[in-house]
Amino acid sequence: GGAGGSFSAVNSLNTNYIVDSSASGTIVLTLTATNSCGTAITDTVTLNVSAGIIPTFNPIPPVCQNASAPVLPTNSTNSPSIIGSWNSVVSTSTVGTTNYTFTPNAGQCATQGILSVTILPLPTITATTPGSRCGTGSVTISATASSGVINWYSSSTGGTSLGSGSSFTTPSISSTTTYWAEAVDGTCISSTR
């Protein structure tokens, strides 16, 4: 990248040269001062500007929608570590990938960094097909999920899965019995059965 910047007061001897935050390379400043008699004095200064260090971070694994949000680290994985803060905390309410911007604390030769966090949608049961029979016996019921695998349960919360797959054959039953389907995609589980 090229180096660059600007003077805070162009026509004054009382001025500062402000280096662009993205600058790197060599900047040659030549200052010429002319007194009221027309005598000019010229001086040249060479600045070597190093590029700021880009903070690096371990990736955050995908998070399920509405799950506990990960806390972004305030120290980078660089050596030495760059300390700073993020433009926002992670929200898991919206599905998609969000880029979070890290700003280093002042006094570190570092630039801003970016960390992406992906929020995955919860799978849902999109359709169910009940079953029926006359008399005692087994019934096959089925369900469809938006994604992932379907687990079957004998209660609306808790308990152990009775089986998995898009269809489930009940044990022998003699009266109307309710079973619940739950969709699981990776670590994401449907919000209700």
Image (cartoon, helix red, strand yellow):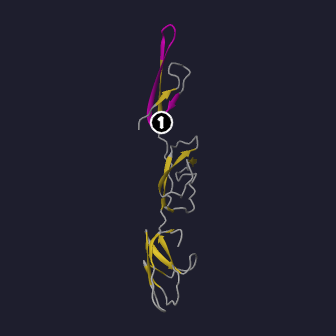
Q: Residue furthest bottom?
A: 136
Q: Quadrant of residue 169?
A: bottom left
The answer to whether residue 70 is above or below residue 143 is above
Q: How far across and how far down the image is residue 11, in percent?
A: 51, 18
**Residue that mark 1 sits on:** 49
Q: How far across and how far down the image is residue 56, in percent?
A: 50, 51
Looking at the rendering, the stretch of residues picked out in magenta corresponds to 17-41
Prevalent SS, magenta region: strand
Residue name at image x 47 percent, y 36 percent: 49
The answer to whether residue 150 is above or below residue 121 is below
Residue name at image x 53 percent, y 22 percent: 9
The answer to whether residue 153 is above or below residue 135 is above
Q: Label 1 sits on what residue type?
A: Val
From the viewer's side, name the closer residue of 100 and 141.
141
Q: Residue furthest front?
A: 134
Q: Quadrant of the N terminus?
A: top left
User: Tag 1: Cα neighbours inside 10 Å, few (<14), some, or many (≥20)?
Assistant: some
